Image: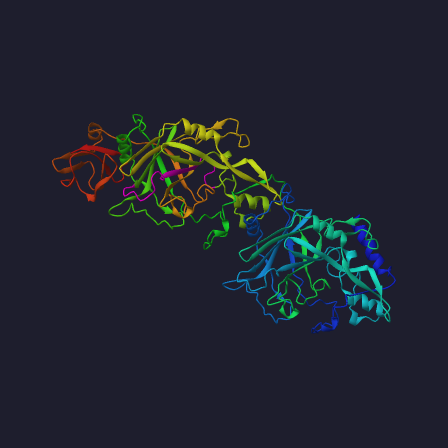
Amino acid sequence: MRKIATLLFLTLFAAGAFGQAFSGVSWVNWNNEPDYPDITGYADNPYDNPVVVVNQTPPGLDLGNITMNVPTFDMAWGLLGDSMAVAHLTSNGVAGDLFDLGSETPSFGAAWKAIHDGANLYILLKYWDLNAQADAGSLSFEVMAQPTSPVRHEPSFIAASDSAEAAVVAYQNMAYCRIVELGGGKAVFKDGAVSEYSATVGLDKVEQDFRGYWAANWGSNEHGLLALAQAPHFWDDTDGVIRAIMVMSFDGALGYPADPTNLEGDYMAVEVGDTIAFDIKSNSLVGGAENDNKVEYFWASDKNQGYAANYYSGHLILKEAEGPAATPAFSGVSWVNWNNEPDYEGVTGYADNPYDNPEVTILKAPASWTPVSDVAGFDATWGILGDSMAVSNLTSNGVAGDLFDLGSEAPSFGAAWKAVHDGANFYVLLKYWDLNGQADDGSLSFEIMAQPTSPVRHEYSFEAASDSAEAAVLAYQNMAYCRIVELGGGKAVFKDGAVSEYSATVAYDKVEQDFRGYWAANWGSNEHGLLALAQSAHFWDNTDGVIRAVMVMSFDGALGYPVDPTNLEGDYNAIQVGETFAFDVKSNSLVGGAENDNKVEYFWASDKNQGYAANYYSGHLTLSDEEIVISSIREREANNLKVYIHEDFLNIRGVEVTDVEIYSITGAKVKSARDVSGQLNISDINDGIYIVKLKGIPNGYKVVK
């Protein structure tokens, strides 16, 4: 139907159905066209007419519903690749050429990107005026589109200057104007609304005295303007940057009459695969409302006649979607600003992870081990478990200071953790020192982040968004990187021995987002895990400025994950020994009050306060089946390794040279030495019970002086 209608239309034109030619709009002065070598007419086009392929979202990704905001706009802008600069100065230049987006410190100019969903063309626009050079409220856009005959509107083109025919053909070829019969127009877009959608209205023609043709009036494309008035555009002007989206429907704003002689009849819709003529103009005033104060740029055109003639315009190809139909994607939580991610040399996307993601092996407790229930038990376990992991990455804004000093000679403030498991539960041992009472009373707490499945990404098959050859669903999934409760785990708030929250982005408690073909996950509770944490025997003691705490996470409860990730009410799988899960620890405190600036917050693995928003930053723990062995003297003798104290010397038999660390029963390191051969003088250590650690040997050795 569409091809037949177009053929009829072209046939009517070719046969001279209107009887007279159409003139271009009067303000187009073709005499100002420059001469080009070897070009005697306009048949040989000296202009670039840039071509942009506009990708389609895959089936199932509905962009027709939108609740747009700045973070979502920025995420979409980042997704869509390189922008097209609106950089051709077409004003008279008296107010200057302010465009500098290609400079080291860009401040002024406009650019655009686009995507379509098979029913609408979404034009994403940005206009920067960071230094407020333009008059307030003067920034706007003009978007020009012509859906049919994007190169010329004449079915058979003969350059006017080469024509041996009469004036009718010459005037036809001189016009080059887009007329409303061909669809489209020039849309004036400002403050989120389209106030005009105009073109040279060929059927609203005026007979010209002394000339054998009619001239087309400049008028409104009412069919398209109605569609633009009903479309869900977006506009935000924050901090000197306009972010905007103009929505052009295929059957409305980009529709064209099936019968070009009848503007009141049926309209045809642009289709996927079509090419349309297209241009964007940015407008502003500098210093007043006079014409000399205009600063106007085009994307494709190099003169301010962009809608007068698609001769100057660029072309958009509405590409068909690739790949199979997809289920709606999940968005990351809104407070994650991926634009703040630094660039890394040789890294084109997030598949190549530039973060350390520290890895820790968690040993299994001996069968005789009793879970911590008092300070002595905590200190004994802490001493046995070897080196601690410092929670020292400052992620608060630093106004209240960086108090962490556990690596100093006289440590007073900071947190650290160790861990052990018994095959059924994971025990996180935590210490928080505030020996000088610097933090507000009662403000010290922990947050424990864990995700048992897919520790590196939440997608089962990850492909970096920036490297993806597929369409937007995959890109949105990969940009999210959020841990969702279907994969188990969450962020546990642990204070005073109780877990008050175990939350994550709850993907199946989802909110449909207008204008985005995916759902955004709400932040909500992992009820299955929270119930298990409420029933666990945690430990908490705050004595003499040191918090000692143990949070217990059961394999089948707090670290369990749903068998069917679409059914949170169904059965859960328990994490198993040998598996690896994403993990992080955050320490919280306030110094001087409850304001945000008074927060002092540190992470173990993450270097920004988005540890649970994205396991991209987290560390990884592997549950080992290797059991900790705390040998008695007889056992050590049987193994030909003896560690014992005689008088003021620590004696070591069964190993020639080793590094030695000695811990008190409270977990404090009291002495260390390297390259010890058989004997170490410990006369400087008080009498008591100690744990001795030898390099390369996982066992801890209990000795008494």
- Residue situated in front as seen by the camera: 128 or 3: 128
- As drawn, is 484 to the left or to the right of 88? left
Counting from the top left corner in percent of width and height, residue 601 is at: 38, 44
Counting from the top left corner in percent of width and height, residue 547 is at: 31, 36
Quadrant of the rendered image containing residue 537: top left
Q: Residue at x 69, y 62 (%)?
A: 313
Give yes or no for residue 440 being in the magenta stretch.
yes
What count of labels does the image hold?
Answer: 0
Visible in this render: residue 119? yes
Q: Residue at x 77, y 49 (%)?
A: 268
Counting from the top left corner in percent of width and height, residue 631 is at: 24, 30
Q: Colour scheme in the image?
A: rainbow
Give yes or no for residue 589 being in the magenta stretch.
no
Counting from the top left corner in percent of width and height, residue 702 is at: 22, 32
- Residue situated in front as seen by the camera: 183 or 470: 183
Determine the residue located farthest toward the left in the rendered image. Answer: 647
Determine the residue located farthest toward the front in the rendered image. Answer: 593
Q: Residue at x 21, y 38 (%)?
A: 655
Work out whether 264 lies above or below 389.
Answer: below
Quadrant in which the C terminus appears:
top left
- As drawn, is 306 to the left or to the right of 502? right
Work out whether 173 lies above or below 527.
Answer: below
Q: In the image, which residues are magenta?
A: 434-456
**Majority SS type along the magenta span:** loop
Visible in this render: residue 555? no
Quadrant of the rendered image containing residue 219: bottom right
- Residue situated in front as seen by the camera: 206 or 316: 206
- As drawn, is 255 to the left or to the right of 339? right
